[in-house]
Image (cartoon, rainbow, N blue to C red):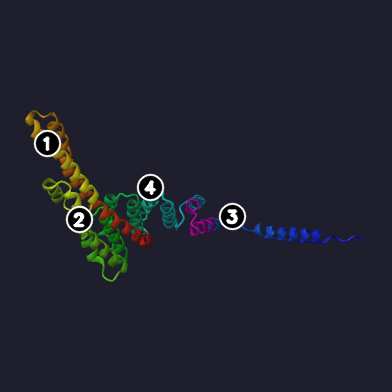
Amino acid sequence: MKYLKPNTLMIFFYLLMQSALNAGSLDIDYFKHQNIYRFADNLYNEGDYLRAAGEFQRYLFAFNSSPPNTDSVFYKIGRCYRFSGHYDKAIEYFQKIVDNYEQSKLLYHSHYQIGLCYFLMNKFEESTIFLNSYVSAVDQNDIKLRLNQLKAINYIQQKEWDNAIHLLNANKNTDPFTIQLANLANEGQQLPRKNKVLAGLFSTVIPGTGKLYCNRPFDGFQSLFTTAVFGWQTYDGFHEDGMHSVKGWIFGVIGGIFYLGNIYGSVVAAEIYNVEKEEKHLGKIKVFINVNLD
């Protein structure tokens, strides 16, 4: 009598187990509404947002009419698009809740999400206008606080420090995020800044000193040296040949251009100094915001 080899037995038992598992899986109807939703939700939780959005949409299409949880599905689709950077599509779905589900528990959350999408698109003014049109109607303190926080963040991004501070101080109470945001806004308001007029005046009196005032010593000494050299050559030319000196006129005109450029450059240096300080501080705020915004 011939016996089956061990390898043949192992293959036989493996195929038997696979058949049993497949037979059990035949009982699952993957096209049922609840199974489509579970699959979409699983993709959402795993961070596969675009596929999740497609499955949530397939879930809605599986019904002949809108299911009772349509607003929450729209909300999840909107968040999927927001997390994947498709902000216009996200706004489209959040807006459906705003327009068609006025009694939804997600109504004011959708307002917040739309304002947040505009913010993430760097449309800070548009975000503020949108939030202003709804915040007064909100009667839930936690939602109103989030809307006002987002308004304040928009003000901060537009460097409207006074507006941000006023709004945050009126809402901070004991909320840690609002308190920290208010502190960052105060720091932004008190950043060291250089006066453009003063920088220009300094370089008018002594070339290059406006740039020294703006913490640009190399540029300042370069302007001083260049203007001094052209000034000396101009003086030397006119001193030797009088007003008919070609050398005097050439160096005088070029030197005058450098002198005016030194004044203008000092004004620009003050602007650059202020912008760099503000952008560095805004970068710090952006990191803090990205960690805390939902």
Magenta span: chief secondary structure: helix
Mark 4 Cα shell of 10 Å, populated few (<14), some (14-19), many (≥20): some
Q: Which residue is mark 2?
A: 193
| Amino acid of disc 3 | Tyr
Between label 2 and label 3, give the one nearer the viewer: 2
Query: Which residue matches tag 4?
Result: 88
Magenta segment range?
36-53
Q: Nearer the viewer, mark 1 or mark 2?
A: 1
Position above or below: 202 against 175: above
Q: Secondary structure at mark 3?
A: loop
**Residues under labels 1 and 3: Cα distance?**
94 Å
- As shown in the figure, which amino acid type bears the numbered disc 1? Asp
Gap between marks 4 and 3, in whole Å? 31 Å
- Foreground residue among 274 and 146: 274
Tag on residue 236?
1
Instruction: Please tell me which of labels 2 and 4 falls first in the chain.
Output: 4
Residue 162, visible in the rendered structure: yes
Return the residue at label 3.
30
Crowd around label 1: few <14 · some 14–19 · many ≥20 (10 Å): some
Residue 46 counted in the magenta span: yes
Q: CA distance from mark 2 to mark 3?
A: 63 Å
How far apart in space, not on screen, are marks 2 and 4 (Cα)? 37 Å
Q: Please identify the residue farthest to the front as the structure is shown.
A: 240
- Tell me: residue 260, above or below residue 185: above
Q: Secondary structure at mark 4?
A: helix
